[in-house]
């Protein structure tokens, strides 16, 4: 990545959903090489914050920005969003699903077969995605982050539905991304053992940085 | 462009595989056109006269039937979020999805119409004219319908609402399509006049549909 993002920040972000204030005057800093782990109870606004950074929601007030990165692109265009929904087409094979996102989203990263091997799905490449288990779907979705290169990874409950071995493998891949100067924001209610991490705790009513 | 060609290829695969619904529109078209002679009775002159209109009504309904899943499947599985985040202009994404949708569901209607026209006792000139107007007119139906599909993307069972929303916009297409097809066999209206307007409607909707559809998708999310 020639144009690496040094820092992603949000200032005084406020957001309403369905008439309820979900984020109130929230500020955060995520720096390259370190994971920003967003924790909080269910409904505290973790997923909302990630969707906000991904440009899928619009704040009522506040601003976001990046230091470094490609000035031609918006923040969302430099982000990988790994959310609850898997964006997989059951009629297509594992390989076809991944190859589509590699061709569509660009710039290309790992090849499809390399990415499948890294998440441990290499043997299932020609299987229709309809036959995958929940954990395998999750891993295939995660492989999408490997086939195209984007500096910011937004991970929403990244380890849900994964067994212990897959979880270790996923954390290794995230670690490699951080080592390469990448930036990670992860929302979770579990303890994620990242090597270098900062915490951001969202409370149900008052929002404070921990 | 490779992003858009990848999208086109994927949409065609999805449409033609099991559960894709590419043939559903064509089968519905077949049902509508087949039952009309039974309902109207064996008056061959009457059938020949209403033939182009029946084919057009069948094509319109078949197109509306298949449009509601155009964006909804992508929204349900989260793919739409990724498309919205990406660098590929949303207008071009909508355009390519419409083109793929038309190739998978509209083109079979055009191909089937000469065969079904025989059921309606239409003469060869009328068959040719109706097929030509359908070839020009059905893309317009898809592009106009895409606006409705984008507006109703977040609604469960939005299919009927889609039909009601876009029906007023598709009626002009059908009027000029039928009148061009009828003009080919009946004096005194020349064929070219309504056909030119039909072609203009097609080109107009090809521009308007993707722009309006993309705007609706951007603002319809949350």
Image: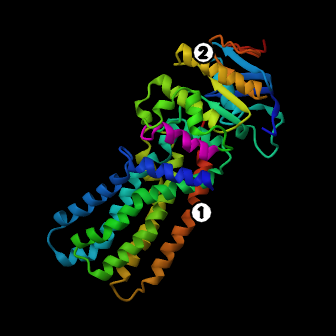
Left or right: residue B32 versus residue B12 is left
Query: Residue at (30%, 71%) from the top-left corner?
Result: B114
Is residue A96 highlighted in magenta?
yes
User: What percent of the width, then of the height, locates residue B32?
Assistant: 27, 59
| x, y percent for residue A104 | 60, 46
The residue where tag 1 is placed is: B207
A175 or B10, nearer to the observer? A175
Q: Quadrant of the C terminus of chain B?
A: top right
Q: How many marks?
A: 2
In the image, B46 versus A6, the foreground residue is A6
Q: Which residues are magenta?
A: A90-105
* Residue drawn 57% across the image and 41% down it: B80
Co-location on one chain, circles 2 and 1: no
Tell me the CA gap for discs 2 and 1: 44 Å
Question: Is A110 drawn above or below residue B9 in the view shown?
Answer: above
- Seen as rendered, the residue at the extreme bottom is B188
Q: Residues within 10 Å of mark 1 (few under 14, many from 20)?
A: some
The chain to which mark 1 is attached is B
Q: Is residue B59 above or below residue A93?
A: below
In percent of width and height, residue B26 lies at 33, 58
The residue pinned by badge 2 equals A42
Colouring convention used in this rendered image of the protein: rainbow
- In the displayed structure, does residue B167 sit left or right of residue A187? left
Residue A21 seen: no
**Residue B148, numbered label:** none
**Residue farthest toward the right in the current orientation of the protein:** A67
Across and down, in percent, residue A12 comes to 81, 25
Q: Does dot 1 land on a helix, a strand or a loop?
A: helix
When asked about the image quadrant of residue A153, the answer is top right
Residue B177 belongs to the span the image colors magenta: no
């Amino acid at each position: 990545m020639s144009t690496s993002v040094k820092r992603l920040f949000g200032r005084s972000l406020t957001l309403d959903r369905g008439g309820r204030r979900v984020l109130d005057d929230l500020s955060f800093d995520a720096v390259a090489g370190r994971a920003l782990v967003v924790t909080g109870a269910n409904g505290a606004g973790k997923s909302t914050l990630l969707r906000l950074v991904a440009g899928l929601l619009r704040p009522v007030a506040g601003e976001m920005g990046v230091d470094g990165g490609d000035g031609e692109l918006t923040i969302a265009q430099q982000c990988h969003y790994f959310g609850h929904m898997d964006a997989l087409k059951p009629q297509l094979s594992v390989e076809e699903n991944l190859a589509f996102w590699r061709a569509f989203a660009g710039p290309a990263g790992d090849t499809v077969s390399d990415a499948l091997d890294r998440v441990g799905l290499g043997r299932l490449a020609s299987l229709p995605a309809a036959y995958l288990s929940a954990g395998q779907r999750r891993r295939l979705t995660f492989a999408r982050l490997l086939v195209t290169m984007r500096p910011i990874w937004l991970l929403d409950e990244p380890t849900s539905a994964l067994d212990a071995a897959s979880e270790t493998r996923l954390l290794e891949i995230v670690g490699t991304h951080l080592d390469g100067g990448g930036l990670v924001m992860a929302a979770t209610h579990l303890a994620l053992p990242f090597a270098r991490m900062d915490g951001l705790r969202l409370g149900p009513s008052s929002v404070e940085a921990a | 462009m490779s992003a858009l060609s990848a999208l086109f290829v994927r949409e065609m695969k999805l449409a033609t595989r099991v559960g894709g619904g590419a043939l559903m529109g064509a089968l519905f078209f077949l049902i509508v056109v087949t039952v009309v002679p039974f309902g109207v009775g064996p008056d061959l002159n009457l059938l020949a006269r209403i033939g182009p209109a029946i084919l057009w009504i069948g094509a319109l309904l078949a197109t509306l039937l298949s449009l509601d899943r155009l964006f909804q499947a992508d929204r349900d599985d989260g793919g739409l979020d990724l498309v919205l985040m990406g660098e590929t202009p949303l207008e071009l994404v909508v355009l390519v999805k419409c083109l793929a949708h038309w190739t998978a569901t509209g083109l079979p209607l055009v191909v089937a119409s000469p065969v079904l026209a025989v059921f309606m006792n239409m003469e060869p000139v009328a068959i040719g004219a109706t097929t030509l107007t359908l070839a020009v007119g059905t893309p317009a139906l898809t592009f106009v319908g895409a606006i409705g599909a984008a507006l109703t993307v977040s609604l469960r069972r939005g299919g009927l609402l889609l039909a009601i929303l876009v029906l007023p916009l598709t009626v002009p297409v059908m009027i000029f399509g039928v009148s061009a097809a009828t003009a080919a066999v009946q004096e005194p209206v020349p064929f070219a006049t309504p056909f030119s307007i039909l072609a203009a409607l097609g080109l107009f909707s090809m521009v308007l549909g993707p722009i309006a559809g993309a705007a609706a998708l951007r603002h319809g999310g949350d």
